[in-house]
Image (tube, rainbow, N blue to C red):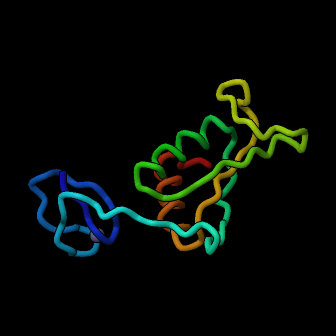
Amino acid sequence: MAFCPNCRYEYLPEVQECPDCGAALVTELPEIKVDYKDVKWVALPALSGVVYAKMVADVLDQHEIPNYIQSLFGSGGLGIISGAGLAGASARIFVPENRLKEAAEIQNEIMPDA
Ligand SMILES: [Zn+2]
């Protein structure tokens, strides 16, 4: 596999440089160490359900973008996300401010109608 060290996108092995930014691709991404206490969390546009938010969050995980899901279902202590049972609820994903643009593009790609 080939990865762009800047964009952190994955490309086919035969790709030599990043089509987005022109950087030489590397075979392994360096690990991102996030200092969470300095992170300013910002919300992506709300999604129509926790299930969708989880789908987006999975891809954010693949891109090593830290994230967490907040259910907008109400304030009744719905802290635990239990999957399909909450379909129809609104949810939104929080990501660090410095990854917002990247995360928004990912969400938009997966959920163009959100
Ligand atoms: Zn790149």
Q: Residue at x 66, y 25 (%)?
A: 84
Give the number of marks.
0
Q: Position of residue 34 (x, y in %)?
A: 51, 67
Look at 21% across and 74% down and name the residue there.
Answer: 23
Q: Give the x, y percent position of residue 78.
A: 81, 38
Q: Residue furthest right?
A: 76
Give the answer, above or below, for where 38 lies relative to 8: below
Does residue 36 lie above or below 81 as drawn? below
Residue under the image location 90 percent in, 39 percent down: 76
- In the image, is 98 to the left or to the right of 25? right
Q: Position of residue 88 (x, y in %)?
A: 73, 33
Residue located farthest toward the left when viewing the structure as drawn? 14
Residue visible at 9% across and 54% down in the picture:
14
Residue 105 placement, left or right of 86: left
Residue 71 in percent (x, y) is at 75, 44
* Residue at the extreme top: 85
Quadrant of the rendered image holding ligand 1: bottom left
| Image-based side of 92 in relation to 79, left or right | left
As displayed, is residue 112 above or below residue 3? above
Q: Quadrant of residue 45?
A: bottom right
